[in-house]
Image (cartoon, helix red, strand yellow):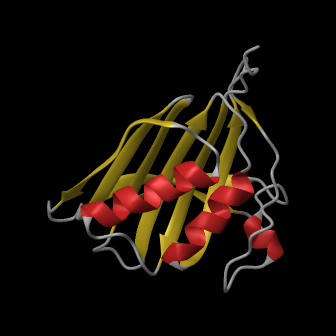
């Protein structure tokens, strides 16, 4: 009997102290994440470093049995930044992803957890993992609605969520 499909999508933005700067490091890190969340890789992980000024960093991708995992890491920014996209039709415990992210010494983390089963429903999720300098209130957007704004970050126009008091 086949397992039921769940269609969960976790999107993470993290300002970090460290990023992978070598392709094999990014591939190994993504492989460890895939294993930790119990996914089955089909292709990859594959990584490529981009040396373009203002966009220096690595992108790593993997096609998994139940969808995909993508890591973008910019290493020339201050602070450095990681964007992570984990989509699966299987089970997904976001806390495993946040624990995995600790290897990059996060300074600030924001996320969206989406149930894509029938629509794009936001799933309330209060992170248990708190990073140095963060409070429990910082770890969850459930306490106050964010305000959207656009900003230039590392040469790219970025949609940023700002928490209101």
Picture quadrant of residue 63: top left
Name the residue rendered at 70%, 20% in the picture: 119
Q: Is residue 155 visible?
A: no
Work out which residue is located at the far bottom of the displayed protein and give it. Answer: 133
Residue that extends furthest to the front in the rendered view of this protein: 1
Q: Residue at x 62, y 55 (%)?
A: 36
Task: Tell me if residue 145 comes above or below residue 132 in the rendering.
Answer: above
What residue lies at 81% left-to-right and 59% top-to-bottom?
144
Q: Nearer the viewer, residue 145 or 119?
A: 119
Q: Quadrant of residue 137?
A: bottom right
**Looking at this view, is 47 or 157 the one in front?**
47
Q: Quick check: 79 left or right of 21?
A: right
Report the quarter where the N terminus lies: top right
For residue 15, above or below residue 40: below
Residue at x 15% of width, y 65% of height: 53
Left or right placement of residue 46 versus residue 71 in this view: left
Vertical placement of 45 versus 102: above or below?
above
Q: Name the spot of residue 72 as percent of width and height, x first.
A: 38, 55
In this rendering, position of residue 68 left or right of residue 43: right
- Which residue is nearer to you in this view: 100 or 161? 100
Q: Quadrant of the C terminus?
A: bottom right
Q: How many marks?
A: 0
Q: Tell me where residue 85 appears, x and y as whole percent.
A: 51, 45
Q: Is residue 125 visible?
A: yes
| In the image, farthest residue toward the top | 1
| 148 left or right of 70 in image | right
Where in the figure is residue 71, as x and y percent of width and height?
Answer: 42, 53
């Amino acid at each position: 009997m086949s397992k039921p499909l769940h269609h969960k999508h976790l999107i993470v933005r993290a300002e970090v102290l460290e990023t992978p700067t070598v392709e094999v490091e990014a591939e190994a890190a993504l492989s460890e994440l895939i294993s930790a969340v119990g996914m089955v890789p089909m292709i990859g992980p594959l990584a490529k470093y981009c040396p373009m000024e203002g966009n220096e960093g690595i992108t790593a991708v993997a096609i998994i049995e139940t969808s995909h995992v993508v890591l973008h890491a910019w290493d020339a920014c201050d602070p450095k930044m990681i964007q992570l996209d984990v989509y699966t039709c299987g089970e997904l415990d976001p806390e495993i992803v946040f624990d995995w992210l600790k290897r990059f010494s996060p300074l600030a983390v924001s996320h969206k957890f989406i149930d894509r089963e029938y629509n794009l429903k936001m799933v309330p999720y209060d992170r248990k993992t708190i990073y140095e300098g963060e409070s429990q209130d910082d770890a969850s957007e459930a306490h106050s609605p964010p305000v959207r704004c656009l900003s230039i970050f590392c040469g790219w126009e970025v949609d940023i969520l700002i928490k209101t008091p």
